Image: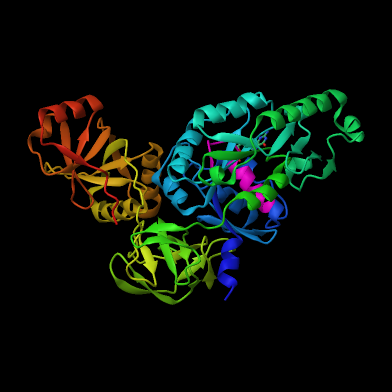
Amino acid sequence: MTTLPHEIQRRRTFAIISHPDAGKTTMTEKLLLYSGAIQSAGSVTAKQNQKQTQSDWMTIEQQRGISISSSALVFDYHGYHINLLDTPGHQDFSEDTYRTLMAVDSALMMLDAARGVQAQTEKLFAVCRNKNIPIITFMNKMDRPAMDFFELLEQVESTLKIKVVPMTWPIGSGPDFKGVYDLQQKRVFLYERTEHGKKRAPVQVADLFDPQLETLIGSDALQILQEQVEMVEGVLDPLDPEMFLRGEMTPVFWGSAITNFGVENFLDALVELAPSPHAIQTTQGKLEPTEESFTGFIFKLQANMSKQHRDRTAYMRVASGTFERGMAVTHTRTGREIRLSRAHTLFAQDRESIEVAYPGDIVGLVNPGVFQIGDVVSVNPKIRLADFPRFTPEHFATVSPKDVSKRKAFRKGLEQLSEEGVVQIFFPTDGARDPILGVVGQLQFEVFEHRMLEEYNVPLDLMHSSYKLVRWLAGEPSALARFAKHVEDDRGRPVMLFRNRFDLEFALEQYSDLEFLPQPKDM
Ligand code: GDP
């Protein structure tokens, strides 16, 4: 009977948030290397040639012959069971990325130490902040000339409004980067490079006042290090666990994923610091993971993942209790009883059936069209999620198949890909036939076009629209046409598209009964 608390306690479910090129894929691979899941690293160099629509993991997969092209990497480290969720590494942004963050207990924020906080880091960070997701920071690429260390920390604090607490401190940067001083253990870790960082970096450990240290790193570097450490210890607060868990304070580590310097210190601290699975808010109140009866929720849908398996997968996070394959549960949105028999785990040569899973784990369920994002499956038929956000589109385009004979495949693709959250769809109400796609980031259009072609064999005509703002309406105002375009969402709810804020505000002035609703959550 003690299995469930023990399994929960050792689980760590997190995602990496970063701006493209900060080193997320490299770090992912190094985490696998240090955990022993792979024997040597070095696939990332091949990545530059890959298509943008692919998951970064596909590169690792192709290079290693392992199948990880799905949503979670699972590995064990020092008795901890880690689920690392993929946030697609697009230059741009999609709902998919946001949604993945609904299924994690913490996030690893990776910054390029030469560039500091970049646009996409900021956006992803905002989602984490909004959900109070604890954040652990890694300053990467210390083997390259970096920003001034204190300036970099200051920039994180002022841009992201989060307090920083260094847990390690870099010893030099660029070609002089030698290792890190661990401020907790009060030990110096000096690393040696291995060829292309393929193997774990040999490490030598010393005390800050070890007489030998001067010979190892040089007297200038030693003096700088001792001064900086004194300063850091003097001015910075210790890590406050409560503030960290609320996402108001972040522990900071330094290193270089490519050379493996600092990666082990980081991973050791990561498993200790990152929280185990948290309770979730449901319509029945707070649901603790330790609750014995099983509940899980769907946070992501994906179609046509591999050519051998042309079906859809719904990704479920176990929220409470123990999942057992084949168990009978209620699909609480429809009240239907379903059996979870076609469940698979993700990190394997191919799909492997998963027999048992615990809170924090991600289970792929083959989805014969029953599941939607935010759905709950539970032993308790009443449970629904209290909150599962959709994100407001900011770009719109009218779409139609190039070849009219492909209308049927077009509609099917449209329906499935919108269900997955690749795009949102709106339908014109003025008799025009072509639907309008809404996306959060422009790249979603490209992903959509690519997948319609590859998976449904439908080449598209896409016409970007000048509308930029969307509002759901309470009621049915009719005379708005001068200011806006009247459309319906995929559930037939009335929606207005505006070109700009000026039109929107003018419409509000003109029509006193005009009222907008918050974007519906679709549950
Ligand atoms: P992602 O886009 O965040 O997944 O970034 P990648 O892991 O693909 O890394 C982007 C580029 O930065 C690649 O060329 C990597 O080899 C390089 N890179 C990653 N980590 C480091 C690092 O610690 N030091 C240096 N010098 N380059 C790195």
- In the rendered image of this protein, does residue 316 appear above or below residue 180? below
Q: Where is residue 142 in the image (x, y as percent from the top left)?
A: 69, 32
Q: Can residue 287 be seen in this view?
A: yes
- In the rendered image of this protein, does residue 317 appear above or below residue 266? below
Quadrant position of residue 250: top right
Q: Where is residue 380 in the image (x, y as percent from the top left)?
A: 37, 71
- In the picture, the quarter occupied by the C terminus is bottom left
Tell me: 287 left or right of 50: left
Residue closest to the eye, 320 or 232: 232
Residue closest to the eye, 257 or 252: 252
Is residue 22 part of the magenta span, yes or no? yes
The quarter of the rendering in which ligand 1 is drawn is top right
Tell me: 498 left or right of 284: left
Q: What stretch is highlighted in magenta?
A: 17-33
- In the rendered image of this protein, does residue 38 appear above or below residue 148? below
Tell me: 337 left or right of 127: left
Q: Position of residue 499 (x, y in %)?
A: 23, 29
- In the rendered image of this protein, does residue 177 appear above or below residue 490? above
